[in-house]
């Protein structure tokens, strides 16, 4: 009998269907991966299981019994524990105090007895820890083990781990995997949320792949490969926008030269990235999320300074420049996070002029008529459902993205970098954004499109550069690309015949 | 079965003007017990609090006098807060302006008022700016929290003032810890006969208008609002966020410095230890009460000016402790601020269905969208 069964789980966050009739089952004593892109619905599903969200439809069976889980407290009673991405430990308390917190009886508290109990529990599960140590002195990996211990101390038999490796350095990842294997040997079940293929293959028994809120399939580790999983994650569907014509060899608009950059944890995110984008082509950066795409987008927007290497736009060296110089050099940017590009409490018209404020200012005074006319004009041209004076936050996601697009394109960019421009949009808005990108390409703009959606990549790209762990593993023309080959490259294998890290 | 549910929803427009009235009624209900304990009739007390100050020419003018520094510090705080710079140091910047005014006022005696007064104001502005400079630089260069640094500098300048008044500036005639009186040409001209309302009030009003103009009509103002409302997005769009914050912080300090000039050159004519009973902190309350809207801030400053005048009237007329006025004033501020926050919510009865099948629950704001 499965330890957990989730049947037909549906959860809607208007307008997005986060979980669409998801079936999921967990056997006792298995490590089961939930694999999928950001926004595929993994975390939502697990939050439903842990009682943080409530499903609109569907039911949950724990040990074959129908369970109504409406709060984490009930989940814990049913033996379900969760270790979230952001830890919930009190740094100034000891390990033992953190573990027993909220799980003590009566008013009295005996610190020594608590330490004794926690030490016993830790020994039982083979978790190395000092119960008397203060949490603020512990490393991230040690804190995560305390979170696991906390769940086990509450008699969890099912442990949900939400992207547990995203906060860890590689050595700590190995320790975590050893811990998880020890728990499995003790008969516990683990749900391992991840989008990293190699980790899933290293530690899990079965893998359920989610895409856009739906289950793509559940596979045994022994019967699958990283390449197959990559294809399952990014999917393959047909859609309406058609790319036409081969791109002529244009002049090089963007040149990246051995670029290195660090992520916000100070770890290398981009390694020796060299790329060229020509006028009149779309170069796509394909890859599984978290392989350096976000950092590449920020470097090209001017909000992240590269550690090494050079950025050349046409003949200007923009290495280490501010966003305003990128804009002046003719770089249009569409950020990954729409809210990163717009300000909710400002009006639509104000957001639209923010990148080129000098053009709308006379002697330091805003030209309010010009700003309003500019807003009206873009709203008409891009079919945005809004008034110029509306606050940005009142717009829908698709309309916000149209404002971002309108603002970037109204600056007549010569090089455009678009990062996940259609993520979270409905079908109509998606097609609109894609057709606008193609229109720019046809007008001779050099476009760098960062996308985790292979359909989008294959439909729009002239050339595809695959990124894996911060490196460009290869650049291939789209007509020579096959799904299998891209899957292999995205899982880190170097393709034959493709130039490594360079341009054709 | 039904239960009460709180959810986010903006109050209808007609509610907004009623908020101060509702807040006053709630406050007076809450504080009535205290007034009765002080052996006074609550209704009478509240009459003296809110109405009496406006009923005579003398006390009505006094309300404006009390409002003068409040207009300036309210504008100063609003200016910084609008750019997302949490300047808690208006009090210290006010003292810096007051020190500059006390010094300039004694050396400008030979100049005509037409020159001396602008120099005084400019000097106070520069002094406030300089006192605001260090925390602003620490903020933009090293990301040091400005709340802490601006707050701590308030204490520092109190000791500077104390040193000056007990040392080099001690009044040579009386020996009191107060600076020598400033020259008459450096004093801010009176606006009305037989009343101490002075030019500072007009300057306060002008600053409020200038605040509105800068925030809504200039490129700097848009950059400030963009920075304050979405710093990352502003930076992404090419706004020089650091320069914008620095500008806002310095102008804010400058305006607060002018409040110090206004008190020294308009009311006291020399520097004393207690030149400000915490105007700088009241400025924060005024900025929040006014919702960072320049005209709202102007009204809030006048309202606080009325309350502090009323507090004195109450204790004089009814013989209750003057502190009672402070209590009522503080309670009113808390209730008003609370009312402004609560207007963003509403209560309603909902059927107590099983949660998992309730569409209401699914649509509530308690759940975050997936990342």
Image: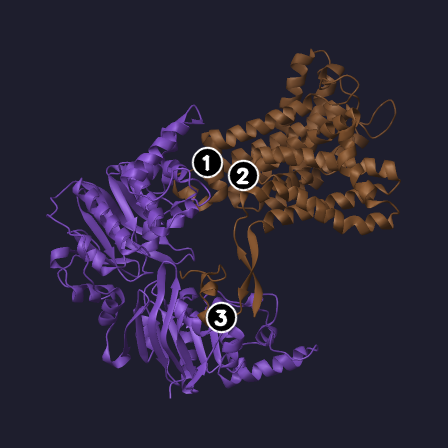
Chain colours: A purple, B brown
Above or below B302: residue A11? below
Residue at mark 2: chain: B
Residues indicated by labels 2 and 3 sit on the same polypeptide chain: yes
Question: Mark 3 and 1 residues: CB-CB less than 8 Å, in contact?
Answer: no
Q: Chain of mark 3?
A: B
Task: Check disc 2 and report its element: helix, strand or loop.
Answer: helix
* Front tag of 2 and 3: 3
Give the left or right position of residue A425, taking residue A493 as reference: right
Mark 3 highlights which residue? B355
In the image, residue A358 above or below residue A334: above
Circle 3 or circle 1, nearest the eye: 3
Q: Give the mark nearest the N terminus, 2 or 1.
A: 2
- Residue at the limit of the structure toward the front, as seen here: B1
Q: How many marks?
A: 3
Q: Residues within 10 Å of mark 2 (few under 14, many from 20)?
A: many
The residue depicted at 48 percent of the width and 69 percent of the height is A52
Q: Quadrant of the C terminus of chain B?
A: bottom left
The residue pinned by badge 1 equals B223
User: Who's the residue at 35% across and 60% down the image?
Assistant: A16
Camera sees residue A460: yes
Q: CA distance from mark 3 to mark 1?
A: 45 Å
Disc 2 to disc 3: CB gap under 8 Å: no
């Amino acid at each position: 009998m499965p330890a957990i069964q989730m049947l037909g789980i549906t959860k809607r966050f208007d307008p997005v269907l986060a979980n669409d009739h998801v079936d999921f089952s967990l056997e006792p004593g298995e490590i089961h991966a939930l694999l999928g892109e950001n926004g595929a619905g993994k975390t939502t599903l697990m939050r439903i299981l842990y009682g943080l969200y409530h499903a609109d439809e569907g039911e949950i069976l724990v040990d074959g019994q129908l369970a109504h889980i409406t709060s984490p407290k009930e989940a814990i009673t049913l033996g379900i524990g969760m270790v979230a991405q952001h830890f919930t430990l009190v740094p100034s308390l000891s390990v033992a105090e953190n573990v027993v917190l909220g799980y003590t009886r009566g008013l009295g508290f005996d610190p020594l007895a608590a330490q004794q109990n926690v030490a016993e529990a830790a020994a039982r599960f083979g978790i190395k820890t000092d119960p008397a140590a203060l949490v603020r002195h512990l490393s991230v990996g040690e804190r995560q083990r305390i979170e696991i211990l906390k769940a086990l101390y509450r008699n969890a038999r099912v442990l949900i781990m939400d992207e547990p490796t995203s906060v860890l350095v590689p050595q700590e990842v190995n320790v975590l995997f050893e811990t998880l294997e020890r728990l499995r040997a003790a008969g516990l079940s683990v749900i391992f949320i991840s989008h990293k293929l190699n980790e899933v293959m290293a530690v899990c028994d079965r893998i359920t792949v989610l895409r856009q809120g739906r289950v793509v399939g559940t596979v045994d580790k022994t019967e699958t490969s990283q390449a197959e999983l990559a294809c399952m994650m990014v999917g393959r569907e047909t859609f309406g926008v058609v790319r036409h014509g081969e791109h002529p060899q244009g002049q090089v608009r963007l040149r990246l030269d051995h670029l290195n950059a660090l992520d916000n944890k100070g770890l290398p995110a981009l390694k020796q990235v060299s790329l060229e984008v020509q006028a009149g082509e779309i170069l796509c950066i394909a890859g599984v999320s978290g392989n350096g795409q976000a950092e590449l987008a920020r470097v090209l927007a001017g909000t992240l300074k590269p550690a090494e290497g050079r950025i050349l736009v046409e003949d200007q060296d923009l290495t280490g420049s501010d966003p305003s110089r990128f804009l002046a050099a003719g770089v249009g940017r569409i950020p990954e996070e729409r809210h990163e590009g717009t300000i909710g409490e400002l009006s639509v018209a104000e957001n639209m002029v923010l990148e080129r404020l000098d053009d709308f200012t006379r002697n330091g005074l805003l030209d309010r008529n010009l700003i309003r006319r500019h807003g009206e004009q873009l709203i008409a041209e891009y079919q945005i459902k809004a008034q110029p004076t509306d606050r940005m936050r009142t717009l829908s996601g698709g309309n916000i993205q149209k404002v971002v697009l309108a603002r970037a394109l109204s600056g007549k960019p010569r090089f455009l970098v678009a990062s996940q421009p259609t993520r979270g949009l409905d079908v109509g808005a998606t097609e609109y954004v894609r057709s606008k990108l193609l229109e720019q390409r046809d007008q001779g703009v050099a476009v760098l499109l960062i996308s985790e959606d292979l359909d989008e990549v294959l439909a729009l790209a002239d050339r595809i550069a695959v990124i894996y762990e911060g490196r460009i593993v290869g650049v291939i023309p789209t007509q020579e690309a096959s799904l299998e080959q891209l899957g292999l490259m995205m899982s880190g294998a170097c393709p034959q015949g493709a130039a490594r890290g360079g341009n054709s | 079965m039904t239960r009460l549910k709180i959810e986010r929803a903006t109050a209808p427009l007609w509610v907004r003007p009623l908020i101060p009235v509702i807040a006053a009624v709630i406050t007076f209900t809450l504080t009535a017990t205290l007034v009765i304990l002080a052996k006074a009739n609550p209704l009478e007390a509240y009459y003296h609090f809110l109405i009496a100050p406006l009923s005579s020419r003398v006390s009505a003018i006094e309300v404006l006098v009390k409002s003068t520094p409040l207009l300036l510090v309210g504008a100063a705080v609003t200016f910084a807060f609008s750019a997302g710079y949490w300047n808690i140091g208006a009090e210290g910047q006010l003292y810096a302006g007051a020190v500059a005014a006390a010094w300039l006022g004694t050396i400008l005696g030979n100049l005509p008022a037409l020159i001396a007064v602008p120099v005084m104001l400019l000097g106070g502005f520069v002094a406030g700016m300089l006192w605001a400079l260090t925390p602003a630089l620490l903020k933009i260069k090293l990301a040091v929290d400005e709340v802490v640094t601006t707050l701590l500098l308030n204490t520092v300048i109190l000791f500077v003032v104390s040193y000056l008044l007990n040392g080099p500036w001690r009044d040579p005639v009386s020996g009191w810890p107060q600076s020598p009186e400033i020259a008459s040409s450096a004093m801010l001209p009176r606006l009305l006969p037989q009343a101490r309302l002075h030019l500072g009030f007009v300057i306060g009003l002008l600053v409020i208008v200038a605040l509105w103009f800068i925030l809504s009509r200039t490129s700097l103002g848009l950059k400030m609002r963009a920075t304050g409302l979405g710093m990352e997005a502003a930076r992404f769009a090419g706004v020089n966020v650091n320069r914008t914050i620095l500008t806002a912080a310095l102008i804010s300090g400058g305006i607060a410095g002018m409040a110090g000039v206004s008190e020294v050159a308009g009311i006291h004519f020399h520097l004393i230890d207690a030149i400000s009973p915490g105007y700088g902190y009241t400025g924060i309350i005024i900025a929040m009460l006014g919702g960072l809207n320049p005209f709202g801030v102007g009204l809030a400053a006048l309202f606080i000016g009325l309350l502090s005048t009323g507090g004195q009237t109450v204790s004089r007329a009814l013989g209750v402790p003057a502190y009672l006025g402070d209590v009522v004033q503080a309670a009113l501020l808390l209730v008003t601020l609370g009312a402004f926050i609560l207007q963003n919510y509403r209560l309603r009865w909902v059927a107590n269905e099983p949660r998992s099948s309730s569409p209401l629950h699914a649509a509530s704001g308690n759940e975050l969208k997936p990342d």
